[in-house]
Amino acid sequence: MNLPQPRAILTLLKPITWFPPMWAFACGSITGSEKIADNLPIFLVGLVLTGPLVCAASQAVNDWFDRHVDAINEPLRPIPSGRIPGYWGLGIAILWSLISILVATYLGLIGFLATLLALVLAWFYSMPPIRFKNNGWLGNLACGISYEGLAWVTGATLISGGAIPSKPSLILAGLYSVSAHGIMTLNDFKAIEGDRQMGVRSLPVQLGAIKAAQVSAAMMLMPQVIVMALLWIWGKEIFALTIGLLMIGQIILLRIFLKRPIEKALFYSGFGVPLLVSGMMVAAFAVQGMGEI
């Protein structure tokens, strides 16, 4: 029996992708309580669940159902290269999903249901016949909700002892979910040819590279403009100005990305997106302890 290589399993689970939902969970937790240390076990389990478990499971699911596309776009990925042979890719996706559900029971009903919803979105994103990712608008929306909004709201709810998050926290979760839609588009520029051949209608396939880059930039920037305006209205001027400065940095980098989106998508992911997610943390601290508006 051919067994998968341990390093190939780690590659399949894509640790580099675990950061966004873990960061969103942390941001939501900050809005939910000024004393995270009082709920440290829940916070740490939540971080592990959102990143190394649920997100990792979603990556395995996606790679299994994308194995034919990856054979064109990225033939060295673990499954098309044969480093994870046979049905091991599917088995790992199922196993990681079940482990995620088991760990989620520690977080009570809210954490358990949030985990189930995240896993449902992960499987529906990749699995035929639903396969949200076949439409770039719908697929990126599902990822934005799962990676950012759901993780944020879950963190805020768990750390506050089950209380419904404040309106400012919920508004931020929604806005940054929209920004995540734009971030997800950045991942599609490297796979245009394979996506086109396999019928995956990503935004670069639907709109062309230049138009898709413009849409991605708008989806990332506009929610931040709204966040900045809201923080100013809520009397958090220093936080609003900080996010404004971070946006200036993003705009400078976007000018490079928009000229050559296919070549510069990875560049912007590495240098522009960190400025956006830094703003998420700034906004989270801004609304920490805020009541209803």
Image (spheres, rainbow, N blue to C red):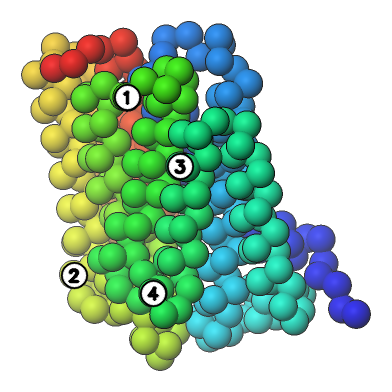
Query: Which of marks 1 and 3 precedes in the sequence?
Result: 3
> Residue 59 sits in which quadrant?
bottom right
Quadrant of image for the N terminus: bottom right
Q: Residue at x 19, y 41 (%)?
A: 223
Query: Which of marks 1 and 4 precedes in the sequence?
Result: 4
Q: Which residue is mark 3?
A: 114
- Between the C-alphas of marks 4 and 1, the distance is 31 Å
Residue 260 visible within the image: no
The residue at the far right in this view is: 1
> Which x, y percent locates residue 117?
44, 50
Q: Which residue is mark 2?
A: 211
Query: Which of marks 4 and 3 precedes in the sequence?
Result: 3
User: Circle 3 sits in a helix, a strand or a loop, which is it?
Assistant: helix
In the picture shown, does residue 31 fall above or below 289? below
User: Circle 2 sits in a helix, a strand or a loop, which is it?
Assistant: helix
Q: Which residue is mark 1?
A: 164
- Between the C-alphas of marks 3 and 4, the distance is 20 Å
Of labels 2 and 3, the one closer to you: 3
Question: Is there a contact, CB below 8 Å, between mark 4 and mark 2?
Answer: no
Q: Which residue is mark 4?
A: 130
Query: Which of marks 2 and 4 precedes in the sequence?
Result: 4
Identify which amino acid the numbered label 4 is placed on: Ile
> Residue 282 sits in which quadrant?
top left
Question: Is there a contact, CB below 8 Å, between mark 2 and mark 3?
Answer: no
Of labels 2 and 1, the one closer to you: 1
Identify which amino acid the numbered label 2 is placed on: Lys
Residue 170 visible within the image: yes
